[in-house]
Amino acid sequence: SSLSTRGDINGNIVPRDVERGDEPGPADQSLLHKMIRRSLVRNRNEVEVLQRDPNSPLYSVKSFEDLRLKPELLSGVYNMGFNRPSRIQENALPMMLAQPPLNLIAQAQSGTGKTAAFSLAMLSHVNPANKWPQCLCISPTYELALQIGQVIEQMGKFCPDVKLAYAIRGNRMERGTKLQQQIVIGTPGTVLDWCIKYKFIDPKKITMFVLDEADVMIATQGHRDQSFRIHRQLTKDCQMLLFSATFEDSVWGFAKKVIPDPNIIRLRREEETLDTIKQYYVVCREEEDKFTALCNLYGGLTIAQAIIFCRTRKTAAWLSVNMVKEGHQVALLSGELAVEQRAAVIERYRNGMEKVLVTTNVCSRGIDVEQVSLVVNFDLPVDIDGNADNETYLHRIGRTGRFGKRGFAVNMVDSEHGMDILRQIEIHFNRSIPKLDPSDTAAME
Ligand code: ADP
Protein backbone atom coordinates (compact mmCIF):
# COMPACT_ATOMS: atom_id res chain seq x y z
CA SER A 1 0.00 0.00 0.00
CA SER A 2 1.13 3.52 -0.68
CA LEU A 3 -0.11 4.78 2.64
CA SER A 4 2.37 4.65 5.44
CA THR A 5 1.45 2.72 8.49
CA ARG A 6 3.11 3.52 11.74
CA GLY A 7 3.93 1.37 14.65
CA ASP A 8 2.70 -1.90 15.87
CA ILE A 9 -0.48 -2.27 13.93
CA ASN A 10 -0.12 -5.94 13.37
CA GLY A 11 0.37 -6.35 17.08
CA ASN A 12 -0.83 -9.12 19.28
CA ILE A 13 -4.36 -10.21 19.55
CA VAL A 14 -5.56 -8.42 22.61
CA PRO A 15 -7.87 -9.98 25.18
CA ARG A 16 -11.49 -9.08 24.80
CA ASP A 17 -12.88 -6.29 26.88
CA VAL A 18 -15.92 -6.37 29.09
CA GLU A 19 -17.97 -9.50 28.80
CA ARG A 20 -21.20 -10.43 30.46
CA GLY A 21 -21.26 -14.17 30.54
CA ASP A 22 -21.28 -15.31 26.96
CA GLU A 23 -22.49 -12.03 25.52
CA PRO A 24 -19.66 -10.19 23.85
CA GLY A 25 -19.29 -6.55 24.83
CA PRO A 26 -20.47 -3.91 22.35
CA ALA A 27 -16.98 -3.26 21.01
CA ASP A 28 -16.46 -6.97 20.35
CA GLN A 29 -19.85 -7.33 18.78
CA SER A 30 -19.09 -4.47 16.48
CA LEU A 31 -15.68 -5.87 15.58
CA LEU A 32 -17.21 -9.25 14.85
CA HIS A 33 -19.71 -7.61 12.53
CA LYS A 34 -16.95 -5.88 10.66
CA MET A 35 -14.88 -9.01 10.36
CA ILE A 36 -17.64 -11.13 8.93
CA ARG A 37 -19.28 -8.46 6.80
CA ARG A 38 -18.67 -8.85 3.10
CA SER A 39 -21.37 -6.66 1.68
CA LEU A 40 -23.96 -4.07 2.56
CA VAL A 41 -26.87 -5.14 4.72
CA ARG A 42 -30.22 -5.07 3.08
CA ASN A 43 -32.48 -2.42 4.51
CA ARG A 44 -35.58 -1.29 2.68
CA ASN A 45 -36.54 1.49 5.05
CA GLU A 46 -36.56 5.10 3.96
CA VAL A 47 -33.61 7.23 5.00
CA GLU A 48 -34.74 10.08 7.24
CA VAL A 49 -32.93 13.37 6.79
CA LEU A 50 -33.28 16.23 9.22
CA GLN A 51 -31.55 19.36 8.05
CA ARG A 52 -30.31 22.00 10.39
CA ASP A 53 -31.29 24.60 7.84
CA PRO A 54 -34.52 23.31 6.32
CA ASN A 55 -34.33 25.90 3.53
CA SER A 56 -31.05 24.70 2.13
CA PRO A 57 -31.39 22.31 -0.77
CA LEU A 58 -31.27 18.64 -0.01
CA TYR A 59 -28.72 16.89 -2.14
CA SER A 60 -28.61 13.24 -2.75
CA VAL A 61 -26.38 11.41 -5.20
CA LYS A 62 -27.12 8.31 -7.20
CA SER A 63 -23.57 7.77 -8.39
CA PHE A 64 -20.05 8.33 -7.13
CA GLU A 65 -19.36 10.49 -10.20
CA ASP A 66 -21.94 12.96 -8.95
CA LEU A 67 -19.62 13.70 -6.05
CA ARG A 68 -16.90 15.15 -8.30
CA LEU A 69 -14.16 13.31 -6.48
CA LYS A 70 -10.52 13.41 -7.41
CA PRO A 71 -10.04 10.78 -10.13
CA GLU A 72 -7.58 8.78 -8.02
CA LEU A 73 -10.09 8.60 -5.21
CA LEU A 74 -12.88 7.57 -7.56
CA SER A 75 -10.60 4.79 -8.80
CA GLY A 76 -10.08 3.70 -5.22
CA VAL A 77 -13.82 3.50 -4.65
CA TYR A 78 -14.44 1.47 -7.79
CA ASN A 79 -11.45 -0.69 -7.03
CA MET A 80 -13.23 -1.76 -3.85
CA GLY A 81 -16.07 -3.05 -5.97
CA PHE A 82 -18.53 -0.30 -5.05
CA ASN A 83 -20.80 0.52 -7.97
CA ARG A 84 -23.08 3.05 -6.42
CA PRO A 85 -23.56 4.78 -3.07
CA SER A 86 -25.44 2.87 -0.40
CA ARG A 87 -28.74 4.18 0.97
CA ILE A 88 -27.19 6.34 3.65
CA GLN A 89 -24.23 7.31 1.48
CA GLU A 90 -26.62 8.85 -1.05
CA ASN A 91 -27.49 11.52 1.51
CA ALA A 92 -24.51 11.49 3.82
CA LEU A 93 -21.78 11.93 1.23
CA PRO A 94 -23.01 15.21 -0.28
CA MET A 95 -23.45 16.58 3.23
CA MET A 96 -20.01 15.49 4.34
CA LEU A 97 -18.37 16.95 1.25
CA ALA A 98 -20.38 20.19 1.24
CA GLN A 99 -18.72 23.59 1.16
CA PRO A 100 -19.05 25.34 3.54
CA PRO A 101 -18.79 22.25 5.72
CA LEU A 102 -21.80 20.76 7.46
CA ASN A 103 -21.88 18.92 10.75
CA LEU A 104 -23.59 15.56 10.73
CA ILE A 105 -24.94 12.92 13.05
CA ALA A 106 -25.67 9.68 11.22
CA GLN A 107 -27.28 6.61 12.64
CA ALA A 108 -27.71 3.34 10.83
CA GLN A 109 -27.11 -0.25 11.80
CA SER A 110 -23.81 -1.95 11.24
CA GLY A 111 -23.12 -2.80 7.62
CA THR A 112 -24.91 0.10 5.95
CA GLY A 113 -21.79 1.86 4.68
CA LYS A 114 -20.97 4.43 7.36
CA THR A 115 -17.27 3.62 7.61
CA ALA A 116 -16.84 3.69 3.86
CA ALA A 117 -18.65 7.04 3.79
CA PHE A 118 -16.48 8.86 6.30
CA SER A 119 -13.32 7.23 4.95
CA LEU A 120 -14.20 8.69 1.58
CA ALA A 121 -14.98 12.05 3.13
CA MET A 122 -11.62 12.18 4.92
CA LEU A 123 -9.66 11.17 1.84
CA SER A 124 -11.49 13.76 -0.20
CA HIS A 125 -11.11 16.46 2.43
CA VAL A 126 -7.35 16.48 2.95
CA ASN A 127 -4.89 18.60 1.10
CA PRO A 128 -1.99 16.23 0.44
CA ALA A 129 0.41 19.15 -0.03
CA ASN A 130 -0.02 20.07 3.62
CA LYS A 131 2.14 17.84 5.76
CA TRP A 132 0.16 17.91 8.97
CA PRO A 133 -2.91 16.15 10.39
CA GLN A 134 -6.13 17.58 8.99
CA CYS A 135 -8.61 14.78 9.69
CA LEU A 136 -8.90 13.17 13.07
CA CYS A 137 -11.00 10.08 13.63
CA ILE A 138 -11.60 8.47 16.99
CA SER A 139 -12.82 4.93 17.50
CA PRO A 140 -13.55 3.02 20.74
CA THR A 141 -10.92 0.30 20.48
CA TYR A 142 -7.57 -0.48 18.99
CA GLU A 143 -9.02 -3.22 16.80
CA LEU A 144 -11.84 -1.06 15.48
CA ALA A 145 -9.36 1.71 14.69
CA LEU A 146 -7.33 -0.76 12.65
CA GLN A 147 -10.45 -1.83 10.75
CA ILE A 148 -11.11 1.77 9.73
CA GLY A 149 -7.47 2.18 8.78
CA GLN A 150 -7.73 -0.77 6.42
CA VAL A 151 -10.68 0.79 4.64
CA ILE A 152 -8.84 4.10 4.25
CA GLU A 153 -5.72 2.36 2.98
CA GLN A 154 -7.69 0.40 0.45
CA MET A 155 -9.77 3.32 -0.72
CA GLY A 156 -6.75 5.61 -0.79
CA LYS A 157 -4.70 3.12 -2.76
CA PHE A 158 -4.31 5.51 -5.69
CA CYS A 159 -3.71 8.59 -3.53
CA PRO A 160 0.01 8.10 -2.81
CA ASP A 161 0.47 11.49 -1.17
CA VAL A 162 -2.18 10.96 1.47
CA LYS A 163 -0.74 9.32 4.56
CA LEU A 164 -2.34 7.80 7.58
CA ALA A 165 -1.16 7.52 11.19
CA TYR A 166 -2.54 5.36 13.99
CA ALA A 167 -2.78 6.94 17.43
CA ILE A 168 -3.14 3.71 19.34
CA ARG A 169 -1.44 2.24 22.34
CA GLY A 170 1.93 0.69 21.72
CA ASN A 171 2.62 3.13 18.92
CA ARG A 172 5.42 5.16 20.46
CA MET A 173 7.05 8.21 19.00
CA GLU A 174 9.95 10.39 19.93
CA ARG A 175 9.23 13.52 21.89
CA GLY A 176 9.13 16.60 19.74
CA THR A 177 7.84 14.73 16.71
CA LYS A 178 5.26 16.54 14.62
CA LEU A 179 3.06 14.18 12.68
CA GLN A 180 3.10 14.71 8.93
CA GLN A 181 0.28 12.38 8.02
CA GLN A 182 -2.89 14.10 6.92
CA ILE A 183 -5.22 11.57 8.54
CA VAL A 184 -4.97 10.28 12.10
CA ILE A 185 -7.12 7.46 13.46
CA GLY A 186 -6.95 6.47 17.08
CA THR A 187 -8.50 5.65 20.38
CA PRO A 188 -9.50 8.54 22.65
CA GLY A 189 -6.80 8.11 25.31
CA THR A 190 -3.88 8.03 22.93
CA VAL A 191 -5.31 10.78 20.72
CA LEU A 192 -5.67 12.98 23.78
CA ASP A 193 -2.05 12.34 24.76
CA TRP A 194 -0.85 13.04 21.26
CA CYS A 195 -2.76 16.33 21.15
CA ILE A 196 -2.16 17.65 24.64
CA LYS A 197 0.68 15.90 26.39
CA TYR A 198 3.09 15.25 23.52
CA LYS A 199 1.78 17.76 21.00
CA PHE A 200 2.42 15.42 18.06
CA ILE A 201 -0.84 16.75 16.64
CA ASP A 202 -1.98 20.36 16.60
CA PRO A 203 -5.73 20.09 17.25
CA LYS A 204 -6.24 23.66 15.99
CA LYS A 205 -5.27 22.50 12.52
CA ILE A 206 -7.81 19.69 12.44
CA THR A 207 -10.57 20.63 10.01
CA MET A 208 -12.53 17.37 10.03
CA PHE A 209 -13.31 15.40 13.17
CA VAL A 210 -14.98 12.00 13.01
CA LEU A 211 -16.32 10.20 16.05
CA ASP A 212 -17.19 6.65 15.08
CA GLU A 213 -19.37 4.19 16.99
CA ALA A 214 -20.64 6.73 19.48
CA ASP A 215 -22.80 4.08 21.14
CA VAL A 216 -19.85 1.80 21.77
CA MET A 217 -17.76 4.78 22.77
CA ILE A 218 -20.01 5.83 25.62
CA ALA A 219 -20.33 2.24 26.79
CA THR A 220 -16.57 2.15 27.38
CA GLN A 221 -15.35 3.52 30.68
CA GLY A 222 -13.72 6.93 30.40
CA HIS A 223 -14.15 7.31 26.65
CA ARG A 224 -17.02 9.71 26.95
CA ASP A 225 -15.00 12.26 28.90
CA GLN A 226 -11.91 11.76 26.79
CA SER A 227 -13.99 12.39 23.69
CA PHE A 228 -15.25 15.66 25.13
CA ARG A 229 -11.72 16.69 26.06
CA ILE A 230 -10.51 16.07 22.51
CA HIS A 231 -13.53 17.87 21.14
CA ARG A 232 -12.78 20.92 23.29
CA GLN A 233 -9.33 21.26 21.70
CA LEU A 234 -10.80 21.67 18.23
CA THR A 235 -11.71 24.97 16.63
CA LYS A 236 -15.31 25.98 16.06
CA ASP A 237 -14.78 25.80 12.30
CA CYS A 238 -13.81 22.16 12.42
CA GLN A 239 -16.34 19.95 10.66
CA MET A 240 -17.84 17.43 13.10
CA LEU A 241 -19.18 14.05 12.04
CA LEU A 242 -20.62 11.50 14.44
CA PHE A 243 -21.75 7.96 13.72
CA SER A 244 -23.66 5.40 15.68
CA ALA A 245 -25.29 2.06 14.97
CA THR A 246 -27.99 2.57 17.59
CA PHE A 247 -29.71 5.57 19.04
CA GLU A 248 -30.85 5.32 22.61
CA ASP A 249 -31.33 8.53 24.57
CA SER A 250 -27.88 8.25 26.10
CA VAL A 251 -26.26 8.21 22.66
CA TRP A 252 -28.42 11.07 21.53
CA GLY A 253 -27.47 13.16 24.59
CA PHE A 254 -23.81 12.53 23.93
CA ALA A 255 -24.11 13.26 20.21
CA LYS A 256 -25.90 16.56 20.85
CA LYS A 257 -23.09 17.65 23.14
CA VAL A 258 -20.48 16.93 20.50
CA ILE A 259 -22.58 18.51 17.74
CA PRO A 260 -25.08 20.99 19.11
CA ASP A 261 -26.73 21.96 15.80
CA PRO A 262 -26.47 18.89 13.64
CA ASN A 263 -27.83 17.70 10.38
CA ILE A 264 -29.19 14.25 11.04
CA ILE A 265 -29.43 11.18 8.88
CA ARG A 266 -31.14 8.05 10.16
CA LEU A 267 -31.88 4.72 8.65
CA ARG A 268 -34.06 2.71 10.96
CA ARG A 269 -33.26 -0.92 11.36
CA GLU A 270 -35.51 -3.27 9.43
CA GLU A 271 -37.73 -4.94 11.97
CA GLU A 272 -37.36 -8.66 12.36
CA THR A 273 -40.56 -10.63 12.20
CA LEU A 274 -41.72 -14.13 12.96
CA ASP A 275 -44.14 -14.08 10.02
CA THR A 276 -42.21 -16.48 7.85
CA ILE A 277 -41.19 -18.78 10.67
CA LYS A 278 -43.03 -21.91 11.67
CA GLN A 279 -42.55 -22.38 15.36
CA TYR A 280 -42.92 -25.57 17.34
CA TYR A 281 -42.09 -26.98 20.69
CA VAL A 282 -41.01 -30.41 21.80
CA VAL A 283 -41.29 -31.71 25.35
CA CYS A 284 -38.19 -33.43 26.67
CA ARG A 285 -37.17 -34.62 30.08
CA GLU A 286 -33.45 -33.83 30.04
CA GLU A 287 -30.51 -33.17 27.77
CA GLU A 288 -30.24 -36.73 26.48
CA ASP A 289 -33.86 -36.53 25.55
CA LYS A 290 -33.38 -33.24 23.73
CA PHE A 291 -30.56 -34.78 21.81
CA THR A 292 -32.78 -37.68 20.76
CA ALA A 293 -35.46 -35.23 19.64
CA LEU A 294 -32.88 -33.40 17.60
CA CYS A 295 -31.76 -36.62 15.94
CA ASN A 296 -35.38 -37.40 15.11
CA LEU A 297 -35.72 -34.02 13.47
CA TYR A 298 -32.70 -34.71 11.35
CA GLY A 299 -34.01 -38.13 10.56
CA GLY A 300 -37.27 -36.78 9.22
CA LEU A 301 -36.19 -33.65 7.41
CA THR A 302 -33.73 -32.37 4.89
CA ILE A 303 -32.05 -29.60 6.78
CA ALA A 304 -29.71 -27.42 4.80
CA GLN A 305 -28.24 -25.53 7.69
CA ALA A 306 -29.18 -25.25 11.32
CA ILE A 307 -28.24 -23.17 14.33
CA ILE A 308 -28.68 -24.64 17.78
CA PHE A 309 -28.69 -22.35 20.78
CA CYS A 310 -27.63 -23.63 24.19
CA ARG A 311 -27.59 -21.79 27.48
CA THR A 312 -24.13 -22.80 28.67
CA ARG A 313 -20.79 -23.47 27.07
CA LYS A 314 -20.82 -26.87 28.72
CA THR A 315 -24.05 -27.94 27.04
CA ALA A 316 -22.87 -26.52 23.73
CA ALA A 317 -19.62 -28.46 23.93
CA TRP A 318 -21.40 -31.68 24.96
CA LEU A 319 -23.95 -31.34 22.21
CA SER A 320 -21.43 -30.68 19.49
CA VAL A 321 -19.44 -33.77 20.47
CA ASN A 322 -22.60 -35.86 20.25
CA MET A 323 -23.67 -34.37 16.95
CA VAL A 324 -20.25 -35.15 15.51
CA LYS A 325 -20.63 -38.73 16.70
CA GLU A 326 -23.88 -38.86 14.78
CA GLY A 327 -21.96 -37.92 11.67
CA HIS A 328 -22.81 -34.22 11.43
CA GLN A 329 -20.33 -31.55 10.46
CA VAL A 330 -20.53 -29.22 13.42
CA ALA A 331 -19.17 -25.76 14.12
CA LEU A 332 -18.99 -24.74 17.76
CA LEU A 333 -19.12 -21.09 18.67
CA SER A 334 -18.85 -20.11 22.28
CA GLY A 335 -17.73 -17.40 24.61
CA GLU A 336 -14.17 -18.47 25.26
CA LEU A 337 -13.20 -17.84 21.65
CA ALA A 338 -11.44 -14.60 20.75
CA VAL A 339 -13.19 -12.40 18.21
CA GLU A 340 -10.87 -13.53 15.41
CA GLN A 341 -11.67 -17.16 16.14
CA ARG A 342 -15.38 -16.47 16.24
CA ALA A 343 -15.16 -14.70 12.92
CA ALA A 344 -13.35 -17.72 11.47
CA VAL A 345 -15.99 -20.15 12.77
CA ILE A 346 -18.82 -18.03 11.37
CA GLU A 347 -17.03 -17.68 8.06
CA ARG A 348 -16.65 -21.44 7.68
CA TYR A 349 -20.28 -21.98 8.56
CA ARG A 350 -21.46 -19.33 6.16
CA ASN A 351 -19.45 -20.92 3.41
CA GLY A 352 -21.21 -24.17 4.10
CA MET A 353 -18.17 -26.03 5.42
CA GLU A 354 -20.29 -27.02 8.40
CA LYS A 355 -24.01 -27.58 8.33
CA VAL A 356 -24.72 -27.23 12.02
CA LEU A 357 -23.71 -24.36 14.22
CA VAL A 358 -23.93 -25.00 17.94
CA THR A 359 -23.66 -21.86 19.98
CA THR A 360 -24.34 -20.07 23.22
CA ASN A 361 -25.65 -16.53 22.96
CA VAL A 362 -22.48 -15.22 21.38
CA CYS A 363 -23.72 -15.04 17.85
CA SER A 364 -27.44 -14.55 18.15
CA ARG A 365 -27.00 -11.16 16.52
CA GLY A 366 -23.77 -11.76 14.72
CA ILE A 367 -24.88 -13.75 11.76
CA ASP A 368 -27.44 -13.48 9.10
CA VAL A 369 -29.86 -16.33 9.57
CA GLU A 370 -31.55 -16.02 6.17
CA GLN A 371 -29.68 -19.03 4.87
CA VAL A 372 -30.53 -21.10 7.92
CA SER A 373 -33.56 -23.35 7.57
CA LEU A 374 -33.77 -24.59 11.14
CA VAL A 375 -33.16 -22.83 14.42
CA VAL A 376 -33.32 -24.90 17.57
CA ASN A 377 -33.58 -23.42 21.01
CA PHE A 378 -32.00 -26.31 22.86
CA ASP A 379 -32.51 -24.04 25.85
CA LEU A 380 -35.09 -21.27 25.75
CA PRO A 381 -33.73 -17.76 26.12
CA VAL A 382 -34.30 -16.34 29.59
CA ASP A 383 -33.28 -13.10 31.26
CA ILE A 384 -31.48 -12.87 34.60
CA ASP A 385 -34.78 -13.17 36.45
CA GLY A 386 -35.62 -16.38 34.65
CA ASN A 387 -38.37 -14.83 32.52
CA ALA A 388 -38.69 -15.23 28.77
CA ASP A 389 -36.17 -13.09 26.94
CA ASN A 390 -38.41 -12.15 24.03
CA GLU A 391 -35.94 -9.88 22.37
CA THR A 392 -33.30 -12.59 22.18
CA TYR A 393 -35.92 -15.06 20.97
CA LEU A 394 -36.77 -12.72 18.11
CA HIS A 395 -33.13 -12.16 17.25
CA ARG A 396 -32.43 -15.86 17.20
CA ILE A 397 -35.22 -16.89 14.90
CA GLY A 398 -36.63 -13.70 13.34
CA ARG A 399 -36.05 -12.67 9.75
CA THR A 400 -36.26 -9.33 8.05
CA GLY A 401 -38.76 -8.56 5.34
CA ARG A 402 -41.77 -10.30 3.97
CA PHE A 403 -39.81 -12.14 1.35
CA GLY A 404 -37.34 -13.74 3.68
CA LYS A 405 -37.02 -17.44 3.09
CA ARG A 406 -39.26 -19.63 5.17
CA GLY A 407 -37.69 -21.29 8.09
CA PHE A 408 -38.68 -23.13 11.17
CA ALA A 409 -37.84 -22.99 14.80
CA VAL A 410 -38.06 -25.75 17.36
CA ASN A 411 -38.09 -25.01 21.07
CA MET A 412 -37.04 -27.70 23.51
CA VAL A 413 -39.09 -27.54 26.68
CA ASP A 414 -37.74 -29.55 29.60
CA SER A 415 -39.80 -28.46 32.62
CA GLU A 416 -42.92 -26.76 33.93
CA HIS A 417 -40.89 -23.59 34.08
CA GLY A 418 -39.86 -24.09 30.47
CA MET A 419 -43.52 -24.38 29.53
CA ASP A 420 -44.22 -21.10 31.34
CA ILE A 421 -41.50 -19.39 29.37
CA LEU A 422 -42.91 -20.74 26.13
CA ARG A 423 -46.35 -19.40 27.06
CA GLN A 424 -44.84 -16.01 27.81
CA ILE A 425 -43.26 -16.01 24.36
CA GLU A 426 -46.56 -16.97 22.73
CA ILE A 427 -48.36 -14.16 24.51
CA HIS A 428 -45.66 -11.62 23.78
CA PHE A 429 -45.67 -12.29 20.05
CA ASN A 430 -49.34 -13.14 19.92
CA ARG A 431 -48.66 -16.38 18.07
CA SER A 432 -49.43 -19.85 19.18
CA ILE A 433 -46.56 -22.31 19.13
CA PRO A 434 -47.90 -25.82 18.53
CA LYS A 435 -46.44 -28.98 19.89
CA LEU A 436 -44.45 -31.07 17.47
CA ASP A 437 -44.43 -34.78 17.66
CA PRO A 438 -40.80 -35.48 16.82
CA SER A 439 -41.75 -38.71 15.09
CA ASP A 440 -44.08 -36.83 12.77
CA THR A 441 -41.98 -34.23 11.01
CA ALA A 442 -44.10 -34.42 7.88
CA ALA A 443 -46.25 -31.68 9.37
CA MET A 444 -43.38 -29.29 9.06
CA GLU A 445 -42.89 -29.57 5.32
P1 ADP B 1 -20.77 0.31 8.58
O1 ADP B 1 -19.63 1.22 8.88
O2 ADP B 1 -22.09 1.00 8.55
O3 ADP B 1 -20.79 -0.93 9.42
P2 ADP B 1 -19.25 -0.35 6.20
O4 ADP B 1 -18.83 0.96 5.65
O5 ADP B 1 -18.25 -1.13 6.95
O6 ADP B 1 -20.59 -0.19 7.07
O7 ADP B 1 -19.85 -1.18 4.97
C1 ADP B 1 -20.34 -2.50 5.14
C2 ADP B 1 -19.87 -3.37 3.99
O8 ADP B 1 -20.40 -2.90 2.77
C3 ADP B 1 -18.36 -3.38 3.81
O9 ADP B 1 -17.99 -4.68 3.40
C4 ADP B 1 -18.12 -2.35 2.72
O10 ADP B 1 -16.96 -2.64 1.98
C5 ADP B 1 -19.38 -2.51 1.87
N1 ADP B 1 -19.78 -1.25 1.23
C6 ADP B 1 -19.81 -0.01 1.76
N2 ADP B 1 -20.29 0.89 0.90
C7 ADP B 1 -20.59 0.20 -0.24
C8 ADP B 1 -21.13 0.58 -1.52
N3 ADP B 1 -21.45 1.82 -1.81
N4 ADP B 1 -21.28 -0.41 -2.43
C9 ADP B 1 -20.97 -1.70 -2.14
N5 ADP B 1 -20.46 -2.11 -0.96
C10 ADP B 1 -20.27 -1.17 -0.01
Image (cartoon, rainbow, N blue to C red):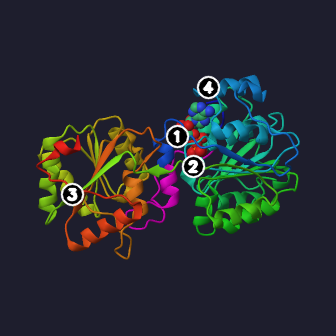
From the top left corner, tell me how far across and down residue 84 is, in percent: 64, 28
Q: Which mark is residue 435?
A: 3
Residue 378, percent across and down?
Answer: 24, 58
Which residue is pictured at 48% across the width and 56% down the height? 28
Q: Residue at x 51, y 35 (%)?
A: 39
Q: Is residue 302 above or below residue 250?
A: above
Q: Residue at x 61, y 60 (%)?
A: 215
Q: Quadrant of the N terminus?
A: top right
Cβ–Cβ under 8 Å for marks 2 and 1: yes
Is disc 4 placed on a helix, strand or loop?
Answer: loop
Q: Identify which amino acid the numbered label 2 is placed on.
A: Gln
Q: Three-letter amino acid code at disc 1?
A: Val
Does the Cβ of the disc 2 residue fall within 8 Å of ligand 1? Answer: yes
Q: Is residue 344 magenta?
A: no
Secondary structure of the residue carrying tag 3 is loop
Looking at the image, tell me whether mark 2 or mark 1 is earlier in sequence order. Answer: 1
Q: Which residue is mark 4?
A: 83
Going from N to C along the chain, the mark reached first, 2 or 4, is: 4
Q: Residue at x 17, y 42 (%)?
A: 442
For ligand 1, tell me if the residue under mark 1 lies within 8 Å: yes
Number of other residues with Cα within 10 Å of mark 4, as a class: few under 14, some 14 to 19, many 20 or more: few
Mark 1 element type: loop
Image location of residue 104, percent across then percent down: 76, 50
User: What residue did someone put label 2 on?
Assistant: 109
Horizontal arrangement in the rendering, residue 243 relative to residue 360 (left or right): right
* Residue nearest the viewer, comparing 350 with 445: 445
**The magenta segment:** 6-31
Q: Nearer the viewer, residue 138 or 287?
A: 287
- How far apart, in angstroms, are the residues tagged by discs 3 and 2? 36 Å
Indicate which disc, 3 or 4, sits on the residue closer to the N terminus: 4
Residue 186 left/right relative to 377: right
Given the image, on which type of amino acid does mark 3 rest? Answer: Lys
